[in-house]
Amino acid sequence: MMDAGRHPNIELLTYSEVEEVSGYIGKFQVKVRKKARHVNAELCTECGLCQEKCPQKTIPSEFDQGMGKRSAIYVPFPQAIPRVPVIDTERCTYFLTQKCRVCEKLCPAGAIDFEQEDETLELEVGAVIVATGFAQFRAEELPQYNRSLSPDIIDGLQFERLSSTTGPTEGEILTSEGVPPKRVAIIHCVGARDEHSNVYCSRVCCMYALKHAHLVRDKTDAEVYEFYMDIRASGKGYEEFYTRVQEEDVYFVRGRAAEVTVLEDGQLMVLAEDTILGKPVSAKVDMVVLGSAMVPQGDSGQVASTFGIGRSEDGFFLEAHPKLRPVETNTDGVFLAGACQSPRDVPDTVAHADAAAGRCLSLLSRGEVTISPTVAVVDERLCSACRVCIDLCPYTAISFISQDGSGTARINEALCKGCGTCVAACPAAAIKARHFTDGQIYAEIVGLLHGSEHEVAEVTG
Ligand SMILES: Cc1cc2nc3c(=O)[nH]c(=O)nc-3n(C[C@H](O)[C@H](O)[C@H](O)COP(=O)(O)OP(=O)(O)OC[C@H]3O[C@@H](n4cnc5c(N)ncnc54)[C@H](O)[C@@H]3O)c2cc1C
């Protein structure tokens, strides 16, 4: 990230959102909303004094998954580039009551700007890479884990923060009472491989759950119980890591944990069936870590429609072909990188992102694109200007051109995929699929049946 921030050919637009995309491969127009930070990034020296002196310091930190606190003016996460803070206008005392302005008074660079407003930028780009990542499955959706009943039933990302030296406990693994746990249960496949949530395997959780077991063993004296269905350790060196964790005296219980209950003394009880022993088992523990699945971002439907890309059944963005075109989408010039396409770990994300960057580079360095000849064309003399085709086109390839009081549909050949939807729907039969006309299809059928026109007429009735 630091390299990207410093690179002369990269302009980072942080705290910004793409609102609209139009155009086509080689010539996309992108509207970006650069949100107001209320801190002038040009003046800010990133000294951190504003955060230190902000009187409002009890806001649950999103980055620390609610386990740590942040101020109303804050840097969203420690490695942010740039480290320019943002004012949370929904929590800042000044924005709520028109009183305070402590940060403004104390900022030595005069960088605080309460009047700053969102900016809209219009960019023209040749290609787009969508890399919006994943969200974590909300374990609250599975009532058997009683997540909301105890602060010691945590999820994978919370454990990541708890064990990180930049986290709320500076890397010490502690229960909500501030003491090291004596027994920890780690539950695999929460929200994955389960018909009540997601049927797919989230691929990453087995390995991160093993990493969590290793960290607990490394940093505390706690016993660790891993409840798993089977371990999927398919990356390079992963099976070896699994063996290593087994040798660290972690107890592996083969069977999906059925329930987590909170006992009267606040301890937690995990109930499961050990499918190797063939009998029910239970473990009384101080902390439960739910190995929650990776799921699509909450706004992935919106992002998909902004960029004109599809989604697969699981909700992740759809690639053009699962084996041959895994970083391309069905919209030429729009590529995918990372976990927005499917759950994947960091090495796979880096490889996927490299492939997307490579595709972009080869596209841009060619300077021209080859488009398929099998596209639809409108016979403008026949078009009745009803616009039915415009709404139906899944590739937003048809626009309406006004002409002397009337108008006609027109197809952008760079966007058209020749799917034929408009051809079939046009009530005036004004649209033809080039190289795919009725006559040509008819001739193909004749060829396929090796028969005469007369025989085909009989077959088709
Ligand atoms: C608990 C847990 C532990 C893990 N541990 C490991 C591990 O030890 N090793 C490993 O290899 N992998 C691990 N992973 C997997 C790893 O997190 C992913 O492989 C990696 O984060 C995927 O990277 P990404 O860039 O595709 O997505 P993300 O890391 O999700 O990044 C996406 C980015 O896009 C931003 N974004 C989202 N929507 C928008 C938008 N509309 N506009 C602008 N920006 C947007 C997000 O804010 C985010 O910064 C773990 C995952 C979990 C859940």
Image: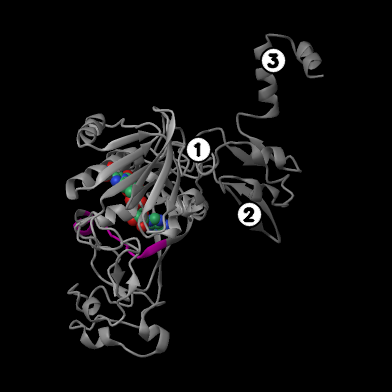
Query: Magenta part mainly helix, strand or loop?
Result: loop
Q: Is mark 1 within 8 Å of ligand 1?
A: no
- Residue 443 belongs to the span the image colors magenta: no
Which residue, given by chain and number where applicable, does mark 2 sit on? Answer: 400
* Residue 303 located left or right of residue 130: right
Q: Amino acid at mark 2?
A: Phe
- Which residue is nearer to you in this view: 359 or 144? 144
- Residue 244 lies in quadrant: top left
Circle 3 residues within 10 Å: few <14, some 14–19, many ≥20 = some
The colouring scheme, among rainbow, by chain, secondary structure or one colour, is one colour
- Which residue is nearer to you in this view: 264 or 430? 264
* Residue 214 located left or right of residue 332: left
- Residue 195 lies in quadrant: top right
User: Quick one: quadrant of the N terminus?
Assistant: bottom left
User: Quick one: quadrant of the C terminus?
Assistant: top right
Which residue, given by chain and number where applicable, does mark 1 sit on? Answer: 199
Residue 360 percent across, percent down from the top left = 34, 43
Residue 245 percent across, percent down from the top left = 23, 36
The label nearer to you, 1 versus 2, is 1
Give how far apart the Cα atoms at labels 3 and 1 are: 45 Å
Q: Are marks 3 and 1 in contact (CB under 8 Å)?
A: no
